Image (spheres, rainbow, N blue to C red):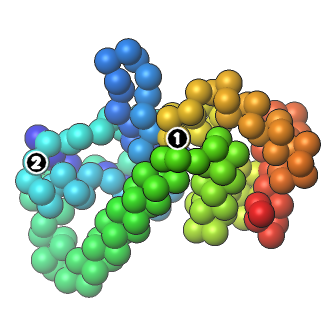
Amino acid sequence: MALFYYQVLNGRVRLSNFLSDGREVLHNVICANEGFGEVAILDNGLNTVTAIADSSCTLLKISSKRFFEIMHEYSHLHHVISQKIARELHFKLFMIKLIYNRSPEEILSNLIHKLNESKRLVCQECNRLMLTRQQLANMTGLRVETIIRTMKQMEKDDKLNIVRGKVFVPADGID
């Protein structure tokens, strides 16, 4: 049962499911000052994902009872939570549309463009993509070998830069 809401104070947490063959399906990456767990609490249901810290983290753990008290006391938070859930749903629908009937290059180009546009998981100072190739594979359903091969081709086509294994996107985005 969903008993807690979590707010990430620092660090990074990924929300995933694991398939019966051990493969990870990456749903979301939660960064500092973001939270997770509200959907299951609002639904009065089960947690449907596993949260895994990607680095050392500090989390604020709020009981579902206290979560509802805070929502009642600060009514404007309903709107904030609703917007967050809507953005996450919009991203899920974007990913579903993206993955079907697209080439690996189209999938990666569009995903990186979306992340850059939303200022998520792309460093706004240096334009480094903050996801590993494995995480991109887990997010898109592509094999990691396909991600690597596609990124190398995108680098040859001057769509991104790879420096010492780190992927950098152009400041004006990917065409």
Q: Residue at x 40, y 59 (%)?
A: 93
Circle 1 packing at 10 Å, graded few (<14), some (14-19), many (20+), is many
Sequence order check: which comes first, mark 2 or mark 1?
Answer: 2
Q: Residue furthest bottom?
A: 76
Any part of residue 73 in sight: yes
Residue 143 relative to residue 64: left or right: right
49 displayed left or right of 33: left
34, 157: nearer the viewer: 157
Disc nearest the viewer among 2 and 1? 1
Q: Is residue 108 above or below residue 86?
A: above
Instruction: Give the secondary structure at mark 1.
Output: helix
Residue at the extreme front of the image, as rendered:
101
Question: Residue 147, located in which quarter of the rendered image?
Answer: top right
Give how far across and how far down residue 116 sits, in percent.
66, 63
| Residue 77 vertical position relative to residue 88 in the rendered view, above or below | below
Which residue position holds label 2?
45
Residue at (79% x, 55% y) in the render = 169
Q: Quadrant of the N terminus?
A: top left
What residue do we see at 83% from left, 36% from top?
152
Q: CA distance from mark 2 to mark 1?
A: 27 Å
Q: Is residue 126 visible?
A: no
Q: Residue at x 44, y 28 (%)?
A: 24
Q: Amino acid at mark 2?
A: Gly
Location of residue 125 (image quadrant): bottom right
- Rendered image: mark on residue 140: 1
| Kind of residue sitting beneath label 1 | Thr
Q: Which mark is residue 90?
A: none
